Amino acid sequence: MAVPRSMTTVTSTPFHHPSSSPHSFSTSILPKPSHFLHTITISTPPRNPKFSTSVSGIWDAITGGVSDSSRQALIAIRRGMILFRQGDVAGSVAEFDHAIQLDPRQKAYLWQRGLSLYYLDRFEEGAEQFRIDVAQNPNDTEESIWCFLCEAQLYGSAEARKRFLEVGRDPRPVMREAYNMFKYGGDPEKLVDMFSKGRESEYFYASLYAGLYYESQNEADKAKVHMVASCKSSYGLRSDDYMASLAKVHCMCRNWEL
């Protein structure tokens, strides 16, 4: 997950999470360390710019050893992401699980699956998914927060905070502040105020995580105010960011009108 989700496409040899197509491969670098996207040269629905891949794809790309099951797994992930954006959360999990059946290596990187599990109230599985993801990428701020969100629903905020996953320093100011707020406790209003005059993406993410923080504290009315604000922000309305879609899915799942 990244802030913002805009991308710069390159066509050089990938060095972290890429996978390959049988003909060529490219990666799209996000402004967050470790999340890379993959373009498949096949006939599928319109390209979704948020596409998870596994580090195992590096070897496949170098050797040309991409199996058909690996390709099908990547296609299933893409379908799952599209379904989530469309509000079919259960359908998205079915596709993500199918991808894991086809290529078990993918599970270690399927943060999208963790997000979907959260909205199905499958919090234990969601926490497990995020813990696996952070084990692969120990600098993943957002996954540590989402693990907390799942475990807060299971054990309460105090216990979830004791279990909070330590990660490296995030280069993004808004996520550093959000991380500290979730880890140590804090004031979501201050988070939003701090970034209200900043970049559109920062205001969106501050509002998004303020809403999620309030939800972890069982303050639904306050959560609604900030989640709706994130959806109605300039970034929330215009961006193709997967998290902008998530904010809308969140409101849909809570029956909050936008």
Image (cartoon, helix red, strand yellow):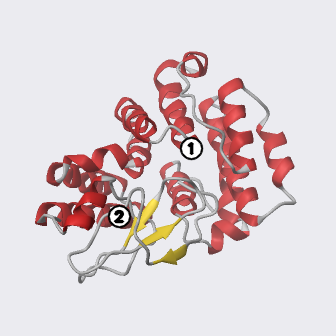
**Circle 2 is placed at which residue position?**
83
SS type, badge 2: helix
Figure quadrant of residue 197: bottom right
- From this view, report whether residue 55 is shown above or below residue 179: below
In-image side of 75 versus 5 (left or right): left
Residue situated in front as seen by the camera: 56 or 124: 56
Residue 252 visible in rendering:
yes
At 74% from the left edge and 57% from the top edge, which residue is drawn?
202
At 54% from the left edge and 21% from the top edge, which residue is drawn?
160
Residue 126 rendering spot, x and y as whole percentages: 39, 37
Q: Mark 2 against mark 1, which lies toward the viewer? A: 1
> Which amino acid, by three-letter code, is at mark 1?
Glu
How many badges with numbers are in the image? 2
Quarter in which the C terminus is drawn: bottom right
Residue 173 rendering spot, x and y as whole percentages: 75, 48
At 36% from the left edge and 81% from the top edge, which residue is drawn?
46
**Which residue, as the protein is rendered here, is positioned at the far left?**
68
Residue 193 rendering spot, x and y as whole percentages: 86, 48
Sooner in the amino-acid sequence: mark 2 or mark 1: 2
- From this view, report whether residue 40 is shown above or below residue 151: below
SS type, badge 1: helix
Count neighbours of disc 2 (C-alpha within 10 A) and say few if under 14, some if 14 to 19, many if 20 or more. Answer: some
**Circle 1 is placed at which residue position?**
142
- From this view, report whether residue 234 is shown above or below residue 80: below
- From this view, report whether residue 4 is shown above or below residue 7: above
Count neighbours of disc 1 (C-alpha within 10 A) and say few if under 14, some if 14 to 19, many if 20 or more. Answer: many
Residue 106 rendering spot, x and y as whole percentages: 28, 50
> Which amino acid, by three-letter code, is at mark 2?
Leu
In-image side of 80 versus 161 (left or right): left
